Amino acid sequence: MIKHDVLIVGAGLAGMRAALEVCRDLDVGLLTKVYPSRSHSGAAQGGIAAALGNSEDDSWEEHMFDTVKGGDYLSDQDAVEEYVKAAPRVIYELEHMGCTFSRTEDGKIAQRSFGGHSKPRACFSADRTGHAILHALHEQVLKNAKSIKIYSEWYMHQLVIEEGRCSGVVVSNIRTGEVEVIHAKAVIFATGGYGRVFKITTNAFASTADGAMAAFHAGIPLEDTEFVQFHPSGLYRQGILFSEAARGEGGYLLNGKGERFMEQYAPSRMELAPRDIVARAEQSEIDAGRGVNGEACIHLDLRHLGEARIMERLPQIRQLGIDFIGVDCVKEPLPIQPSAHYSMGGIPTDMFGQVVIDPDNTPMEGFFAAGECACVSVHGANRLGTNSLLEATVFGERTGRSVLKYAKNAEFGKVNESHERARVLNQIEEIFQRDGSENYNDIRNEMKEVMMEKCGVFRDAENLKSCIAAIQGLKERCKKGKVTDKGKLFNTELYEIIELGNMLEIAEIISTAALARTESRGGHYRTDFPKRDDQDFLKHSLVYPKDGQLELKYKSVVVTRYQPKERTY
Ligand SMILES: Cc1cc2nc3c(=O)[nH]c(=O)nc-3n(C[C@H](O)[C@H](O)[C@H](O)COP(=O)(O)OP(=O)(O)OC[C@H]3O[C@@H](n4cnc5c(N)ncnc54)[C@H](O)[C@@H]3O)c2cc1C
């Protein structure tokens, strides 16, 4: 049995930032199913928010207000306050670790505008910000190789919970296929989001809800899963992201008639309204037949920015357009559509990353979560652009610190190794034994299709009910699938089937929570209940597993400084 003081699953920003705290005094295992620098954090383009005030006066209070308003008042404001206050410090720390930020003329960290932020506060490295931060953190992790052991291309299957306490995880070495138990005093999940559930998504292949579902399978509820963010500018049909930085730098959105339609939807903020509002505006234009050439897309027009500015600030976007569709944004507009981008919901935690399991915030001892897989909740019902890299960094650090404190004084919990291994080996054997005629790729595609159509930018009761029924049908069909590779070495087919199982389960959880929330708030829009309803729904949802079914509970929102009011831009 492998043993570490602390085991972290996920080597994106949150996982690596946490590891750097824990390794100060304890020994850390850092486990990831993809090589660390291939984590989805590395795809982040536009920036990381902090009220540095380098371009205009700014304050943490304004950052906090924008975040709470952007989240349609569902954010827990005590957590938001800690988070925005920490932002400037963590940016300077990243800089000192070696992250190269773009600069102003006088050498300060440059900041640009982003949707829903009333001041330019996105710090950036051209349009490769996530890449720059992820590599800086990876270097620091490698520098601490004595106390951080990386398990690269290992797959986490499930948590070990004994007597109400988390004491490890069960994992596979993808290279050899060996199933192992890792014993730890504390486990941190930093497993990222689950955008791959939707057909059109900006997310990497690894964003498949494994962490969220491992928690759920251990009886832990998932919070606010109905809130999924659709990014306004994914490449048409493919979802590859063109960062909001393109609009932050002054890009226009045009409908098929060549009109800047955001005038109708958010006259004061135009293209820089929060993402939920822009995505709905685009979808409304498309649904009304005003897409470009009658198709389901909108134009992102950057031509007026000129080649020099595009090459300085948005070089990756230009290259993506050229490489994927042969369109050079210096000369032509880019075709875009709303694409599933970010999971506001996740594993419920308090502001120290401690996982909590009920409306009274009872902690699950030894289990922590940070980054996109967690729900603290700073983003509420809708996340503002650039606030997520910040979340992963701030809460990665905070969680690392609280785990260090906890694990230094804790003993190892109990583990029944053979029992835990057997549970996973049986699951794998069950998959190998299936001998039906169903094709897993078809099932995956149908899931993505149905989630996009019926649980997407616009939702209603009828579509959500048929979505849930369709997903349940797909879960049944999965039992009649067939594996072609039954080998042990690098059996990626096996892990994809397990991931598909996780995605089908989270799809049902998302749509069930969405059906129950009969109001519209942030990223969750019900055409049959178009108004926000603070009376009945100023609360977080918690979906629990119960006898093979789903059970819904709710917990209250922490409101401190800013009382809910109407959200207009
Ligand atoms: C294209 C794109 C652009 C973005 N741009 C921005 C931006 O400009 N600004 C911003 O603030 N936010 C942005 N975001 C959001 C932001 O990048 C993410 O929310 C954030 O990086 C998530 O970090 P993380 O550490 O939580 O998870 P990730 O970086 O997603 O890492 C997840 C880790 O978990 C591991 N993992 C998952 N499951 C398992 C398993 N079963 N076993 C082992 N390991 C596992 C993976 O291998 C990976 O290492 C963007 C997102 C996308 C998709």
Image (spheres, grey):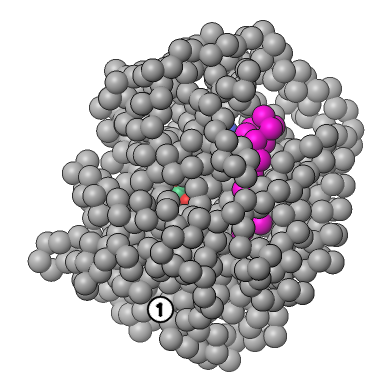
Q: How many marks?
A: 1
Left or right of residue 165: residue 100:
left
* Pick the front one: 115 or 318: 115
Is ligand 1 less than 8 Å from the beta carbon at label 1? no
Left or right of residue 168: residue 284:
right
Q: Is residue 59 above or below residue 351?
A: below
The segment highlighted magenta reads 209-227
The residue under the point 64% across, 72% down is 532
Residue 8 in view of the camera: yes
Left or right of residue 358: residue 18:
left
Residue 302: percent from the left, percent from the top?
40, 78
**In which quadrant is the N terminus drawn?**
top right
Q: Alpha-carbon neighbours of circle 1 within 10 Å: few (<14), some, or many (≥20)?
A: some
> Which secondary structure, mark 1?
loop
* Amino acid residing under circle 1: Gly
Q: Is residue 217 magenta?
A: yes
The residue under the point 81% across, 23% down is 430
Residue 145 in view of the camera: no
Left or right of residue 45: residue 289:
right
- The image quarter containing residue 37 is top left
Q: Is residue 319 above or below residue 391?
A: below
* Pick the front one: 285 or 360: 360
Residue 118: percent from the left, percent from the top?
35, 74
Q: Which residue is mark 1?
A: 251
Q: Is residue 557 magenta?
A: no
Residue 378: percent from the left, percent from the top?
47, 55
